[in-house]
Amino acid sequence: MKIGILAIGNELVSGAAQDTNSSFISRELTAQGWDISAIMVAGDDERTIGNGLDCLMAISDAAIVTGGLGPTADDITTASIAKAFDLNLYTDEAVLKKIRKRFEKHSVKWTPNNTKQAVFPEGAEPIPNPAGTAWGFSLKKNGRILTVIPGVPSEAKRMLFEGVIPLIKRELREDKQYLKSRTVRMFGPTEAEIDQMIRDIDLKIPGISLGFYPHFPENHVIITSKSLTESVAKENLEVAEKRIEEKLGKYIFGYDNDTLEGVVSSLLKKRSMTLSVAESCTGGLITDRLTDIPGSSAFLDRGVVVYSNASKTEILGVPDQVISKFGAVSEETAVLMAEEVGKLGRTDLGLSTTGIAGPAGGMIQKPVGTVFIALTDGKNTMCRRFLFKWDRRRIKKISSQWALEMLRRFLAGSSLTRTNRKLEILK
């Protein structure tokens, strides 16, 4: 079954607001085993809405429209759909009564324009709104289904599950198809490199498909398995997943909803190890990510932001002479930062970052994007030098990602060495 999605609102077209509904709806419909034919965004314009509907209904078995069902003058979705289908409008008195009762229950003043939320095209089936006042509706045309729900995300989500999906299943019966999916989360190689590495893997398995989804600074591969039998769908998914793991295992840090900071936290707890962090260019981002994980106090002793040269000396004891000779952005400084913060916290591990996030401050020897990341266990220390070719915010983000990845690899069994790695240029 193919389903199209149309999001309506001037705020979406202008960029004043993000269309989060369409991405959420498409994920949930895909989980049902349905295909998304197209996703469109239209402003509050009668002709544009009509053209969007014509296109979606021509290529889809069903279409879902969000937005423009409120009481104000710019909420024209219902009227536009009625005109596109050459239908008259009517007020559903039963729905209107329920909306009025909701206003009374919540002590909200009633204004005449709220009646608009109980107006539907002739022949429409109202869809209750359990989270708001604007009801949705559905229409059938030439064997196809059109469903319309509000654009408020909290309302759209509930109505999708409680109204839209059951309605589509009821109206458009199809052979039951089971879908299983797995998101493989990787960090390190680019999307193109991942594609190249898995080209020689035998993935010609019935019902198996792959999707590549860059999610800076990570890359995700989604494996989807479809079959008329649930057990077969599951078995085929496991086979495909195993073959991908054999090829890309060293880059895989998690699956589905795993985060790198969550994986690192679990490993630290599992190994009963503690951590202190000293951050310069990342400005506390590593510590912020780790403290997003519940229970992080079990392993995280402290995180200090030592942004200035003076703070590196006063708080961590990095000698002035080291900074003067090698620079605040150097292997020598990064190593001492990691070792000293570990000593201060009396923790098993010390982690540090120092770099030039830009846009200014770069030099020929150390251009913008130069970052040193050091990790120590008190006996051995590893330091890596990177050159990132992005903007300031992305440099901070990928630096925090690499710091956590170095920590993950060590906790998973990799050894530490004092020797600095070769300059790594990442674009």
Image (spheres, helix red, strand yellow):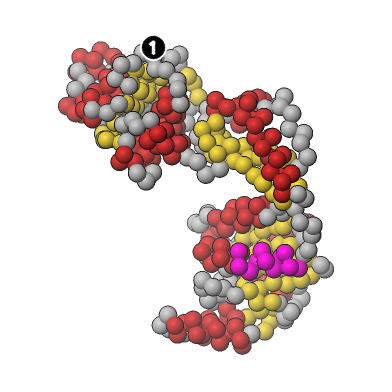
Q: Is residue 111 visible?
A: no
Judge whether 241 appears above or below 162 on screen. above
- For label 1, the crowd category at 10 Å Cα-Cα, with few meaning under 14, some 14 to 19 and many 20 or more, is few
Residue at x-position 60% and y-position 68%:
162
Percent across and percent down for residue 42 are: 63, 60
Residue at x-position 51% and y-position 85%:
100
The span picked out in magenta is 161-171
Percent across and percent down for residue 177 are: 75, 53
Three-letter code for the amino acid on which mark 1 is drawn: Thr
Q: Which residue is mark 1?
A: 419
Question: Is 5 displayed left or right of 330 in the figure?
Answer: right
Question: Is 313 displayed left or right of 374 in the figure?
Answer: left
Q: Is residue 415 magenta?
A: no
Judge whether 369 appears above or below 141 on screen. above
Question: Is 175 displayed left or right of 281 in the figure?
Answer: right
| Towards the viewer: 339 or 95 | 339
Q: Is residue 167 magenta?
A: yes
